[in-house]
Image (cartoon, helix red, strand yellow):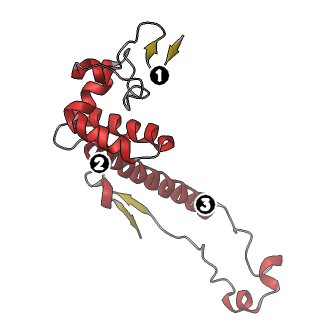
Amino acid sequence: MKESGRKQGAPSPCAACKLLRRRCAQDCVFAPYFPADDPQKFANVHKVFGASNVNKMLQELPVDQRGDAVSSMVYEANARVRDPVYGCVGAISSLQQQIDVLQTQLALAQAEVVHLRVRQTASMPNHGVGPGSPSSSGSPSSRLMGSQVKPIFDMDTVVDQANLGESMWLC
């Protein structure tokens, strides 16, 4: 049975103590978060933050928040190992660019749907509104307009494929 990354009987050092080549004490702050079977986890954190800094950060936090802090440090350290210049910011920036492209594609698809609905409505004879229709006989504004009733959306959508971010023009 394992207890805090150590076997009963012969204590096995946690990944941090193994890397730092020191004896793993019973109250080792690293042991619950850096088990011996995952040495790369601590190696990346040590490379980016340093063991002393990680130790200080964990000591200053309440025990119930340490797990989340270690998860954040591991995520940032792994991102820094993959991209030493930008780290997490590079990943976030890449995801933001993907969101922007997808939002543009969504806006274009929604504009196309509106355009198709307008064309479908425009191609329908009489639109159900006219001088003799029940919807126009009751309101004074519709009687004033008479035969001048136009569809609400009379537009065309122009898409410039070269510039997707600024491509939607409604005329």
Q: Decide if residue 155 is on the left or right side of residue 59.
A: right
| Label 2, residues with CA under 10 Å away: few <14, some 14-19, many ≥20 | few
Q: What SS does tag 3 mark? A: helix
Give the image location of residue 2, x and y in percent.
50, 14
As measured in the structure, the alpha-carbon distance from the residue carrying label 3 to the one carrying label 1 is 73 Å
As measured in the structure, the alpha-carbon distance from the residue carrying label 2 to the one carrying label 1 is 37 Å
Q: What SS does tag 1 mark? A: loop
Give the image location of residue 34, x and y in percent.
37, 25
Q: Between 136 and 39, which is closer to the camera in this rendering? A: 39
Residue tagged 3: 123
Disc 2 marks a residue whose amino acid type is Ser
Q: Quadrant of the N terminus?
A: top right
Image disc number at residue 4: 1
Disc 1 marks a residue whose amino acid type is Ser
The reply to whether residue 82 is in sight is: no
Q: To which quarter of the image does residue 16 belong?
A: top left
Give the image location of residue 26, x and y in percent.
41, 23
**At x 51% / y 59%, what residue is drawn?**
115
Q: Depth-wise, is mark 2 or mark 1 nearer the camera?
A: 1
**At x 30% / y 51%, what residue is drawn?**
161
Q: Between 114 and 143, which is closer to the camera in this rendering? A: 114
Residue tagged 2: 93
Q: Quadrant of the C terminus?
A: bottom left
Q: Decide if residue 113 is on the left or right side of residue 146.
A: left
Q: Between 116 and 123, which is closer to the camera in this rendering? A: 116
The mark nearer the N terminus, 2 or 1, is 1
